[in-house]
Image: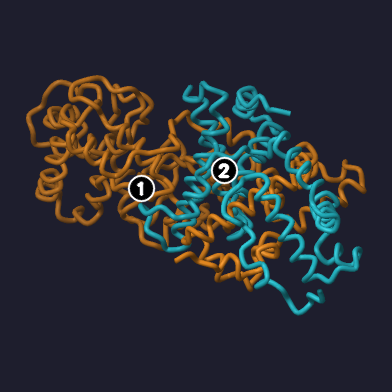
Chain colours: A orange, B cyan
Amino acid sequence: MSCRRAFEIDLLAYLAEPREAEFADFRDHYPRCADCSAELAAWTELDARLHGGGAHPEVEEIAAFAQAPNEMDASARGLLEAHVRGCASCRDELHGLRAFDARGFAAAPAEEIRPEAPSLGVRLRRLLWHPAFAYGLLLLVAAPTVFWLLRPLEESGSLAPTAVFSDHAPAEAEDRAAAQEMIEGKPKVAGKAAPAPAPATVVQRRERADALSESAPEAESAPALESAARMKSAAEPAPAAEGPHGAMAMRGAGGLMAADSAALRENLAAANELTLTRGARPTIGLRNLPDAGLRLGVPADGRSGRLDLRVIAPDGRERREQPAVDADAAWLVLPRDWLVPGVYRVERSGDLPPLEFAVR
Amino acid sequence: MSEDWGALLERLVEGDRLAFARFNRLVTGFLRQLRAYDFQDDWDDLRQEVIVALVQNARAGRLREPAALVGYTRIMTRNKFMDRLKRRLRHQEKETLPWEEETARALPATPDGEEAAALWSAVADLPGDERAIVEGIYRQGRTYQEMSDASGIPLGTLKRRLREALARLRRRMAPGPDPIGPVSQTTTRQDAS
């Protein structure tokens, strides 16, 4: 039986004012209804073709209005303002133009993001049939147990092993491309060199492996960081003369930064709090964050009052906040559902150098 | 006028504002086709995701076919919008929405000049009052009330005639099941005829 709701409403009025309250039920209905979707799609297409390209201001016009409205001809500006007031899509377009920042594009890393990601089943199959997965699983199971047995009692509460060994849960649907990249970015074959930079999770596993090896016999210097198999074989040698608490440089890991394990432990101690420091890129696990999100501490470097902060996500989204400075730091909260895996850039007001942190 | 999307993408990667404005318009156009603005006014997050993904993939050398660029952008915009729509409607992520299927047909980013010309040629063949209403609404940009005031046709009658006119145009452009439907059910108290 075909649905007639698209015929029961004033469809012309809906095309003109779809956000009216009287159409709330229809808005909720038509995307789920084949008949109403077909009817509305046909009317939408016809409406768009009749309007043609003249329904909205030219791109150059709206770009000029976004950048320098006072330099426009007064009458042209008035017409454009009137149009924008009544057109949701042009308002949205204008908003995007006003927020455009060329530097953001310059900072975007060259990561691959594909529009169509394979299904969860395909990804899981790839993961399960991967040799490195077996070694990773072994490390996942054995390492926390050994770690907690070996660490001093008073420090056992200062680090959440799960924050380091969290598994790669599939990302939400809208970030499945990032999840695919994360999985495919894992070391492909044990023993082979992987392209730099290696994933941050591998950094932390390596650090944990080295920390565990304090009582193991010394061996040669750690090889290049490539795969779980290598991590397993390299887990035995302890970093010479440093033990698990000193700084450990990651060799052969491409763009990975040297990580201070003590700073890492401190940053991971509070699963919902992260303090940024210059020259370091602390990492936090997304799965361990509460719904309230991540409390991010940004050093003010001597500034007082409020700090103008711009947080740029790996996919280019950004948040601007002006938290008050307290004890030479400003704190802001990033909601959990705003965060995606990747490297974040935090720009501070004035000429303060930017900072970074990572989420995995 | 067709765009050289490949050259625009190169300029976009360099941070060119006008190139960004063109891609901004492209994505907004797709969002309009998807009727995204039925649900909310602000899709800046989605648009940023799409455009930044374009830049990143261009830098990574993944977008070597300028001819496929528009289709690539459309697919990405559509997928991201549908994910958000499903969450909004609390729909199962893996199940396809009927609206998703309807919008899967490839539509041009902007109406094709030839198609628009053919459509307006069909408008010229409409009965006099219907033609005047269509031209008033779509060419002159009048609202229904303005058109009703200018023509003296009651608002309800005007809308009914417009709907009949559009149904004729639909039949003319894409023959199929009678698209008029129970137009008589949409008459209002203002319909004096």
Residue A3 drawn at (x, y percent): 50, 66
Q: As drawn, is A337 to the left or to the right of A76?
A: left
Residue B96 drawn at (x, y percent): 41, 52
Q: Nearer the viewer, residue A102 or A82?
A: A82
Q: As drawn, is A305 to the left or to the right of A59?
A: left
Residue that numbered label 2 is attached to: B48
Q: Quick check: can you spot residue B174?
A: yes
Residue that numbered label 1 is attached to: A171
Q: As drawn, is A10 to the left or to the right of B161?
A: left
Residue B185 drawn at (x, y percent): 65, 73
Residue under the point 59% across and 57% down: A40
Looking at the image, residue B180 lies above or below residue A65: below
Q: Nearer the viewer, residue A299 or A104?
A: A104
Looking at the image, residue A45 lies above or below residue A353: below
Q: Nearer the viewer, residue A229 or A73?
A: A73
CB under 8 Å between discs 2 and 1:
no
Q: Amino acid at mark 2?
A: Gln
Which secondary structure, mark 2? helix
CA separation in Å, label 2 and label 1: 19 Å
Which secondary structure, mark 1? loop
Residue under the point 57% across and 54% down: B177
Looking at the image, residue A241 lies above or below residue A313: above
Q: Nearer the viewer, residue B156 or A328?
A: B156
- Looking at the rendered image, the quarter that the C terminus of chain A falls into is top left
Q: Residue furthest bottom?
A: B189
Same-chain status of marks 2 and 1: no
Kindly identify which chain the residue marked by label 2 belongs to: B
Q: Amino acid at mark 1?
A: Ala
Total count of labels? 2
